[in-house]
Amino acid sequence: MEVFRRLDAAAMPIDRPNVDTDQITPARFLHKPRSDNHGTYLFHDVRRRADGTPDPAFPLNQEAFAEARIIVADRNFACGSSRENAVWALHDHGFRAAIAPSFGDIFFSNSLKNGLLPVVLPQPVVTDLLAALQEQPGARVQVDLEEQTVTTPDGTVHRFEVDPFSRHCLLNGIDELAYTQELAPQIDAFMNRYGRENR
Amino acid sequence: MSDTASPPRTLFEKIWDRHRILEREDGQVLLFVDRHLIHDGTAPAFVTLRQRGIAPRAPDRIFATPDHYVPTDHRKVAQIADAERRGMVEALERDTAAHGITLFGLEDRRQGIVHVIGPEEGLSQPGLLIVCADSHTSTHGALGALAFGVGMTEATHVLATQTLWQRKPKTMRIAVEGELGPGVGAKDVILAIIAQIGTAGATGHVIEYAGSAITGLSMESRLTLCNMSIEAGARAGMVAPDETTYAYLAGRPYAPKGRDWDAALARWRALPSDPGAVFDREVTLDAGAIEPMVTWGTSPEDALPISATVPDPADTPDPERRGAMERALDYMGLSPGTALADIPVDRVFIGSCTNGRIEDLRSAAAVVRGRRVAPRVQAWVVPGSGLVREQAEAEGLHRVFLEAGFEWREAGCSMCLGTNGEIVAPGQRCASTSNRNFVGRQGPKARTHLMGPAMAAAAAVTGRLTDIRRLEG
């Protein structure tokens, strides 16, 4: 897994709650192999108008956010389907961090396993950040995983919580599977006992 | 009272404890997985395993069926026109054959939506920990299992180790007390719950559904209920096993037999939450107050009784909620104040892991019998499995649907999300028994109204959203 330590980048605001993973990646692209650039499917339909042309009102179509690597959204971001493709689409487009007051559970877990850091900040902080990013399109935000802080464009530093193990994996580019494989003896012992008890 | 007595535990906690292998320093627990259900979207997990030279740890605990990419107008893999979709179904056949994993393939009569066939085959049982790379895995909790959806990296982890790291979720008890009114079923109950607590109302929680209205539900209705737990943000939904559960499971192909059945039954009877067990949150609903429900917007929480009108964003003080409502109404092509029961539909979809079981088809057929699909409405029935389809045909339900002008199709996920290419056209409005009315869920610019199977059948014959209680005999 890709290492994540610090990020200083433009942040793109998606100022709406309950953005579901069907919007992030429509279902008809789910069969595309991981080797594809899933960034081309990101917000594929919601960033377009009825005639298929880009909607200039959608942030992803705006020049100011062309280099954005942080996405900021309102509460319950990426709820719904378990599709990891939603994370792939954000990642392949260049996003490495997502900030919201809350996330869909499965997306949150998928993100941590793909080098996309999900950051939960209090609702008032995110509300202000969304407003600031709309007033100053292209404003930069710093996300520091080692310090567990987010610095907003006005220079305010906000601390965030992150699971220590996930933090360790992200900081060092370790994936969980390699770690679990080391535990094979304990797993085998459990399975033997469990098998006997549940005939 | 003995001071060695263990504190009362919930159904969830009992299953959690039984599957816990070890705990990491950060509090995450390594859980043993009893059953891993896989489908034709799981191919990337096998790609990763091959790249890393790992074989599945316990192939006998993995069960597979293609559902997302299969056509519902024929049963021949070789005839799937789109090469990429055919490739997904073929990959599942190849990966399962290579590792000796049980596959209910497209030409097998037991094929179907993974969440329909798990219970149907008796694979989903009380006390088991079940995962699948699909968020509607919460369905299987209806049998008293702990079942939840995982992502592809997690599915890969489960294939490789038969385990999964999880932080212990919180618990939430939703009690629905009293008697359900006429025309009100499990779909209405779950839509009413989501409308009340919101689409993130149960995030981070495992729900246990309880109360007299829940224990009175059939097994299939409980499956519908638990299926949509994820639409309230829940990690999982479950119902304590009881006589309804045991009667449903007895004799199913993968259910325990003989002395094994007796031993299993003894274990299962110890599973329900102990008296005095504490939940992190408790919610209570009055069953009698629940009406037949329908969604008007683009989130499952946008649900109202069919007797209501389209809400007016101007009446909403919260600017954020007002904005979301305005966007939803714009997308749905609806105006505030319109009676929900006046909204015309173009398509009707009866099926999905939410409402594709035999009781759903019976309930829809009872409405359709002797009636015709309204002019200009295109109506589909997509059974949840080959066995559901067979049972429906044995009961003559297919003739009821066909004579009314419905299409009677083969099993699969189909138009719930359109991964197989079966979608609702842009601008079309669909009365659907599926689980998500998200923007673009049934196809780009498609407009979805969620409801139960009888209501969807009523919409098909009247051509508009219809209060099932007012449908003239």
Image (cartoon, rainbow, N blue to C red):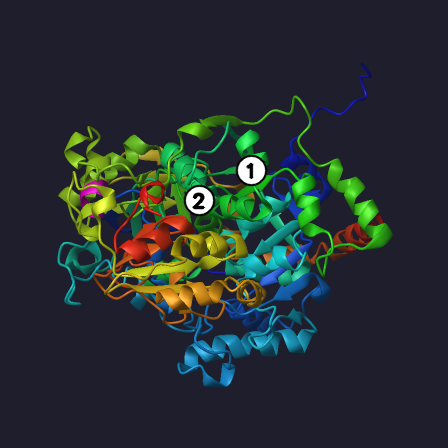
Secondary structure found at label 2: helix
Left or right of residue A165: residue B229: left
Report whether mark 1 lies on the same chain as mark 2: yes
Left or right of residue A174: residue B403: left
Numbered circle sitting on residue B169? 1
Q: Quadrant of residue A31?
A: bottom left
Residue at 74% across, 41% down = B268
Secondary structure found at label 1: loop
Residue at 17% across, 67% down = A52
Q: Are marks 1 and 2 in contact (CB under 8 Å)?
A: no
Label 1 vs 2, first from the N-terminus = 1
Q: Which residues are magenta?
A: B324-328
Left or right of residue A98: residue B319: left
Q: Is residue A78 visible?
A: no
Foreground residue, B433 or B41? Answer: B433
Give the residue at mark 2.
B187
The amino acid type, in three-letter code, at marker 1 is Pro
Q: Residues within 10 Å of mark 2 (few under 14, many from 20)?
A: many
Considering only vertical position in the picture, is B90 above or below A11? below
Foreground residue, B18 or B127? Answer: B127
- Residue B227, percent across and down? 50, 48
Residue at 37% across, 68% down = A29
Q: Nearer the viewer, mark 1 or mark 2?
A: 2
